[in-house]
Image (spheres, helix red, strand yellow):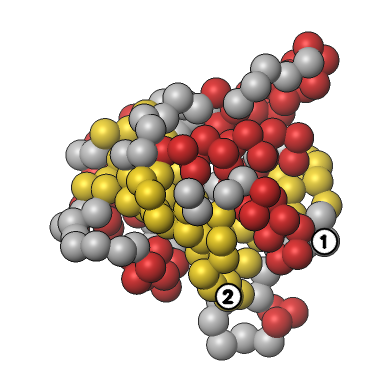
Amino acid sequence: MPPLPDEPKQDLSRIAETTLAHYQARAEQFWEGTRDHDVRQNIEALLAHIEGEAPFNILDLGCGPGRDLLTFTRLGHRATGVEGCARFAAMAREHSGCEVLEQSFLSLDLPEARFDGVFANASLFHVPSAALHGVLCQLHATLRPRGVLFSSNPRGEGQEGWSGGRYGVYHDLTGWRAYLVAAGFEELTHYYRPVGLPREQQPWLASVWRKLP
C-alpha cells in the first residue's frame, strides 16, 4: 500500500490502535461470547468456490481467538491467521496450533501468491474506507491465481465511525462491490445472514470473490 499523507496516516493509526485496545481489554469476554457461533455457511461458501484439490492454504484474516482456524484445520486444510490484537493472537495459537501473524490491517506484510483462500469473517468492516483499497489489493496479491476471498460484514448504508470503542464501516452491497471490483476481484455470490429470516432481520452481508489476473 502506498504511504499515506502524514495527518491521514496519524488518524488511521489512532483508529487501529484504539480498536485493537478495545479487543485487547475484552479478549476473554469476546471468546466466551463467540466461541460457539455457527459460521459453517460462511466456511462452506469459501471452500466451495476454491478450485483444485484439497487441502487448501487458507488465510483467516482477523482470526480473533482462533475458532475458525481450528475448524479449517479439523477439515484438513492448512490454516494461517492474521490478528492485530496481541491477546487474540496468543489465544489463537494456543487454541488452534496454527501459525498466527500478529499484524494490524493497516500494516500488513503478507507473502505473495501463497493462499488459495482468504476468510475475512466479521473483520474487514473495521478497515476505514480511506485504507480499504490498499488492504484489498494486498489480499489480492497474497492469493494465488484465481484464489477466493470470502467476506462477511455488518451491513448498512455506508455509515462510518465509532461504536462502543470500535471503528466500523457499514457497507451496502453496491458500495462493497465497487471496492472489490476496483481491487481486481469478480463477484461469485453474495447472501444475507442469518439465513431464513426477513431481510430487515439479516444484518450481515456475506460475499465471495475470485481474484482476477
The quadrant in which residue 191 appears is bottom right
Vertical placement of residue 10 versus 22, above or below: above
Q: How many discs mark residues in the rendered view?
A: 2
Q: Secondary structure at mark 1?
A: loop
* Identity of the residue drawn at 48% across and 49% down: 213
Residue 130 visible (yes or no): yes
The residue nearer to you, when weighing 64 against 57, is: 57
Question: Dot 2 corresponds to which residue?
Answer: 191
Please name the amino acid that badge 2 sits on. Tyr
Return the disc, 2 or 1, that comes first in the chain's sequence.
Answer: 1
Q: Residues within 10 Å of mark 2 (few under 14, many from 20)?
A: some
The residue beneath circle 1 is: 157
- Is residue 95 in view from this perspective? no
Quick one: SS at disc 2?
strand
Is 98 positioned to the left or the right of 11 in the image?
A: left
Indicate left or right for 191 with 162 as reference. left
Rendered image quadrant of residue 90: top left
**Which mark is drawn over residue 175?**
none
Q: Position of residue 9 (x, y in %)?
A: 74, 19
Return the x and y of residue 136 as percentages of the image width and height: 58, 42
Distance from the alpha carbon under mark 2 to that under mark 1: 16 Å
Badge 1: few (under 14), some or many (20 or more) residues near its Cα, within 10 Å? Answer: few
- In depth, the one of 86 and 208 nearer the eye is 208
Residue under the image location 40 percent in, 44 percent down: 143
Quadrant position of the N terminus in the picture: top right
Residue lying farthest to the top in this orientation? 6
> Could you tell me which residue is drawn at 49 percent across and 41 percent down?
139
- The residue drawn where x is 34% and y is 71% is 48
What is the x, y in percent for residue 186?
56, 61
Residue 23 horizontal side relative to residue 162, left or right: left
